[in-house]
Amino acid sequence: MIQPERILFEDDGSIPNSRYAVLVYRGAIDLENPDLASSMEERFASNHWTDSWRNGIYPFHHYHSTSHEVLGIYRGSATVRLGGECGQDLFVEAGDVIVIPAGVGHKNLGASEHLGVVGAYPNGRRWDVLRGRPGERPQADQNIAVIPTPTEDPLYGSDGPLKKIWGEMFDGIG
């Protein structure tokens, strides 16, 4: 079982970010698989992260106030800014998986020509796209406050690192 990197971001005034850490699983999916995208979709779905899609990452700062999100890189590479304007740049490549808590800003700063990403949500939760604009925060903050902590890690299920790490950070909250 791969242990993820943990990255925390503070509220920057427009992007709320999260009390939960972004989790980055490096090389989590075997690149020898001839259909890496389908493999990611199946693995996420087997752990109740569903409503999946295939595409890229938006080239503008955005966050979701109604769901956490998992992104699996199945082809190419990208540099992603996490946490808003004052956040951190993260290089990701095929085989990497990122779990982004609700409220954490993310943006594609640049990618290889054929970047491929699978995204999914715990229990297929509905998601929104917010951009840190004036007036968003009151409702966004209310939405984020009531999102349950996922019961399954998107890669390793109920025994995976997500529940343990997020549970340790805020035992009993979420």
Image (cartoon, rainbow, N blue to C red):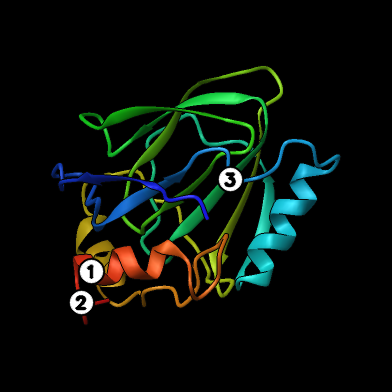
Kindly indicate whether the residue at mark 2 contacts the one at mark 1 (C-beta within 8 angstroms).
Answer: yes
Q: What residue is shown with label 3?
A: 28
Q: What residue is shown with label 2?
A: 171
Q: Amino acid at mark 2?
A: Asp
Q: Secondary structure at mark 3?
A: loop
Q: x%, y% of residue 20?
A: 27, 59
**In this rendering, would 160 be left or right of 77?**
left
In which image quadrant can residue 24 be found?
top left
Residue at 79 percent across and 52 percent down: it is 38
Report the Cα–Cα distance between label 2 and label 3: 26 Å
Which of marks 1 and 3 precedes in the sequence? Answer: 3
Q: Residues within 10 Å of mark 2 (few under 14, many from 20)?
A: few
Q: Is residue 43 above or below residue 25?
A: below
Q: x%, y% of residue 36?
A: 76, 43
Q: Secondary structure at mark 1?
A: helix
Report the Cα–Cα distance between label 3 and label 1: 22 Å
Residue at 53 percent across and 25 percent down: it is 78
Q: What residue is shown with label 1?
A: 168
